[in-house]
Every structure is written in structure tokens, then in C-alpha cells.
Image: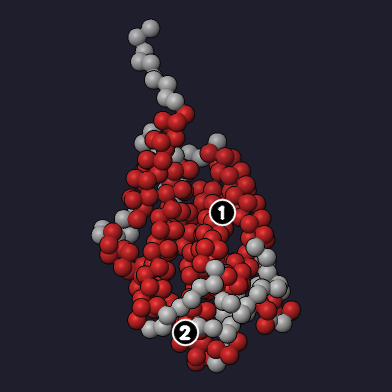
């Protein structure tokens, strides 16, 4: 009789409150590693620029420049590096998001979906910001660049990020069962993609036995399709845009199934024995 009655909220108001919660959680995720948000973005740009520089130098040292697509060589390197970073960063961000037994989940509005979504959005913001700044500086200070289809090329960045977030969701959902194993497995997968993504090769110019080593990887298809949108003289023949979409959808379904199963069994005491 004297119990407080919770006010029923409309679906629209609940949705707006959820979006607001995701926004604030994303802002928190952006500031997690650095106390200064601007410093964090600057470091992200520096790290991306260093990776591009290292790969450009590696291509020159190993004599691999001749296998690049006809066009701007640095833009060719960027097309692989940016896709790889968007994919790997999404995996790391989602797999390392606040778990169901974390302190943040003790607050009533917070839930794993918000944690995963905000971590993925923060990762996407960093990658798009750093990529845009590097492209702007290169276009302004070194050599003007031309992207044949910029909108589809940006769509491939989103696809690389989304497939990374989908794979990261599997690691995130399975981590409570064995944190050490799945934490290491996530790191290994990200490191293996340095080679397995095939960003140093061109699919059309690669022999079939060698191409078969990369063909399983959705990131390999994404990078090759991206180069088709960027360069006028390149048309991908051996990769598909549909394949990474299918892989991402399957990973999302598997990740959600593991997440729902874990939610029914997880306990805050799981981590006390470690």
C-alpha cells in the first residue's frame, strides 16, 4: 500500500534517456586513458602517423613499392593502415569494455549494451578524427590527393569498425568465463591481423595460393574493396563486400547469444578467486 510506485515512461522518452546515457558513457570512454581529452586525440593522431611512416619506410626498404597500385603510394599505405586500425581498435575497445561484474554496472541505468556501444563509438571517433587529420595534413603540406568515391570509402571504414566491434563482442561476452585466456586471445588476434589483413599486398596481383592465406579474413576483403573506391585504376576481382557483412552479422549473433547466457550465470564473486 505504501510502496513507491515507479512512473512508467514512454518508449520515446526511454529511448532518449538511453541515447543520453550512451553519449555520456562515450565521453567517459574517450577520457579513460588520458585525463586530457585533447591530449588523447593528439596521441591518437601521432600513433596513426607513426604507423603510416613505418609502413612507408618498410615498403621502401623491402622493395615492395613496385607491387602497389598505380597512384599515390602514401595513400595506398594509408588505405591499409586506417582500415587495420579501425578494425583492431574496435576489437580492443569492445573486448575491454566494462563487464557485467564491474563497478560501473552497480549503477542502475548502466548495462552491458551501453558499455559496449559507448566503447565502440569512442573507438570510431578516435579513428575517424586521426585519419581525417592525417589526410588533411598530407593533402595540404605534401601532395594533393584525389579519392574516386569518398562516400563508399568512408563506408568501408565503418564496415571495418563494425566487423571489429562484432568480433570484439564475442571476446567481451566470453571473457568472464576465463579472463586470462580470452584477454590474451584478443591481443593475439589483433597482432595476427598485422600480417593476416593483407594490407601489404594487392589481391589482384597476388597468386592464388598466397591469396588463400588471407581470403578467410574479412579485413582483407574490406581493404581491397576500399582501394577499389579510392583509386581510379583499380577494380577488385577476388574480394567481396558481402563477405565481411555476413561475418559481422554472424559474430554479432554469436556474441549476443554468449552475452545472454553469461548474464544468467555471472556473479561478482567470480573474480574474487583470482
Quarter-of-image position of residue 44:
bottom left
* Residue 239 horizontal side relative to residue 169, left or right: right
Could you tell me residue 218's position as x and y percent?
62, 64
Give the residue at x 48% y 59%. 90
Compared to 155, does 142 lie above or below?
Answer: below
Could you tell me residue 109's position as x and y percent?
39, 35
Circle 1 sits on which residue? 166
- The answer to whether any part of residue 183 appears in the image is no
Give the residue at x 47% y 48%. 116
Circle 2 sits on which residue? 56
Which residue is the extreme one toward the right? 208
Could you tell me residue 265's position as x and y percent?
54, 38
Q: Do the residues labelled 2 and 1 touch (CB within 8 Å)?
A: no
User: Which quadrant: the N terminus?
Assistant: top left
Observer-nearest of 195 and 171: 195
Compared to 148, does 169 lie above or below?
Answer: above
- Identify the element where label 2 is drawn: helix
Q: Which mark is residue 191?
A: none
Amino acid at each position: 500500500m505504501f510502496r513507491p510506485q515507479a512512473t512508467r515512461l514512454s518508449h520515446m522518452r526511454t529511448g532518449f534517456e538511453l541515447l543520453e546515457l550512451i553519449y555520456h558513457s562515450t565521453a567517459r570512454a574517450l577520457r579513460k586513458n588520458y585525463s586530457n581529452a585533447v591530449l588523447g586525440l593528439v596521441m591518437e593522431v601521432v600513433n596513426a602517423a607513426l604507423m603510416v611512416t613505418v609502413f612507408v619506410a618498410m615498403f621502401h626498404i623491402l622493395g615492395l613499392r613496385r607491387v602497389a597500385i598505380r597512384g599515390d603510394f602514401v595513400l595506398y599505405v594509408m588505405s591499409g593502415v586506417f582500415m587495420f586500425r579501425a578494425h583492431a581498435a574496435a576489437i580492443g575497445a569492445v573486448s575491454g569494455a566494462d563487464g557485467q561484474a564491474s563497478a560501473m554496472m552497480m549503477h542502475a541505468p548502466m548495462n552491458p549494451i551501453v558499455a559496449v556501444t559507448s566503447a565502440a563509438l569512442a573507438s570510431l571517433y578516435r579513428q575517424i578524427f586521426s585519419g581525417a587529420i592525417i589526410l588533411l595534413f598530407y593533402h595540404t603540406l605534401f601532395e594533393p590527393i584525389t579519392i574516386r568515391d569518398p562516400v563508399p570509402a568512408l563506408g568501408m571504414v565503418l564496415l571495418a569498425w563494425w566487423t571489429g566491434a562484432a568480433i570484439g563482442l564475442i571476446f567481451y561476452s566470453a571473457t568472464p568465463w576465463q579472463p586470462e585466456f580470452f584477454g590474451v586471445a584478443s591481443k593475439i588476434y589483433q597482432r595476427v591481423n598485422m600480417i593476416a589483413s593483407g594490407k601489404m599486398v594487392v589481391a589482384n596481383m597476388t597468386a592464388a595460393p598466397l591469396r588463400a592465406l588471407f581470403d578467410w579474413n574479412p579485413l582483407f576483403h574490406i581493404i581491397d574493396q576500399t582501394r577499389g573506391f579510392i583509386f581510379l585504376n583499380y577494380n577488385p576481382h577476388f574480394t567481396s563486400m558481402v563477405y565481411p557483412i555476413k561475418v559481422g552479422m554472424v559474430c554479432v549473433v554469436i556474441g549476443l547469444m554468449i552475452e545472454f547466457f553469461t548474464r544468467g550465470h555471472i556473479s561478482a564473486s567470480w573474480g574474487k578467486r583470482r
